[in-house]
Image: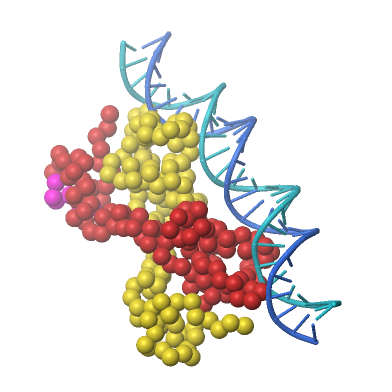
Chain colours: A yellow, B red, C blue, D cyan
Amino acid sequence: MDAASPKTDVFQAIADPTRRQLLRMLGDEEMPVTAISGHFPMSRTAVSKHLRILTDAGLLTERKVGRETRYRLEPEPLLELKRWLAYYERYWENKLSALKRYVESDGSEDGFAAPLEAVERRKDEP
Amino acid sequence: MDAASPKTDVFQAIADPTRRQLLRMLGDEEMPVTAISGHFPMSRTAVSKHLRILTDAGLLTERKVGRETRYRLEPEPLLELKRWLAYYERYWENKLSALKRYVESDGSEDGFAAPLEAVERRKDEP
DNA sequence: ATTATATGAAACCTTTAGGTTTCATGTCAA
DNA sequence: TTGACATGAAACCTAAAGGTTTCATATAAT
């Protein structure tokens, strides 16, 4: 699977801590499987499977060099995560956006003077 | 579990597409379980479990109102994700950082004139 | 040629995820 | 007070995740 049509979702791929560690490890230089797996408390085969999942998600590229396969970070798919996260910027960005939310959803209260704490959790009881 | 000591990892929590949809839905107003579950093709109980997982990760707050429980987005834990992602900024930030990486790891080639494509994937064969 | 290394594929196992259905409990409405 | 609603807990099911060990194959080194 190439990066254009990932078989594995990037959210799914980074859910595992071992895989996140792998991404860190392979950011600055490509490495062959055995060298990589030396840093993990599991079998080489297990690490190899994680490498496959990351590759399927487009987060790693593999390149055969002689008898070894070297892996390296391919950061591009992380942009999807970045975009997803960008949506939530407005929630912590500044008080204005919180106020905007407040006004949009609830509208009818004493408004602008309300501090942030009051903006959170305010919904009429039944 | 409160947001300070989350029982569930945020990476794990957002790995599921249903849960990501829940976060979107609960960003602007709190909602009770039945109303929420109406938007999903699964049982109310199943949705309820997803809500619990998100709450355990600190991504939702629950508040009892009469006989219903209302859930709402708590964006703060997403900052962990943001911080994690920030590390990778340098990989797509600009060509200078790519060049920096190149120089740091490999050092010995014709250097500055190399286009970005050449900067990627360059490691001596065995 | 023979042996050692590097790796992926296969088969298998155990635990977790994601769902379902059923049941008990608390709260609202008549 | 009786019945309807809203919800979580429990028990259960199936498939997927994350491991392991064993085997086959390609390349390198002697």
Image quarter where the C terminus of chain A lies is: bottom right
**Residue at left 48%, top 35%?**
A46
Q: Is residue B113 above or below residue C13?
A: below
Residue B65, image x, y percentages: 60, 76
Q: How many marks?
A: 0
Q: Is residue A3 above or below residue A117?
A: above
Q: What residue range appears in magenta?
A: B111-116
Q: In this view of the protein, which residue sits in the foreground, A62 or C21?
A: C21
When asked about the image quadrant of residue A55, the answer is: top left
Residue A48, image x, y percentages: 45, 36
Instruction: Answer whether residue B67 is visible to the viewer in this image.
Output: yes
Magenta segment includes B115: yes
**Residue at left 62%, top 63%?**
B48
Q: In this view of the protein, which residue sits in the foreground, A119 or A81?
A: A119
Q: Is residue B124 above or below residue A53?
A: above
Q: In this view of the protein, which residue sits in the foreground, C29 or B60?
A: C29
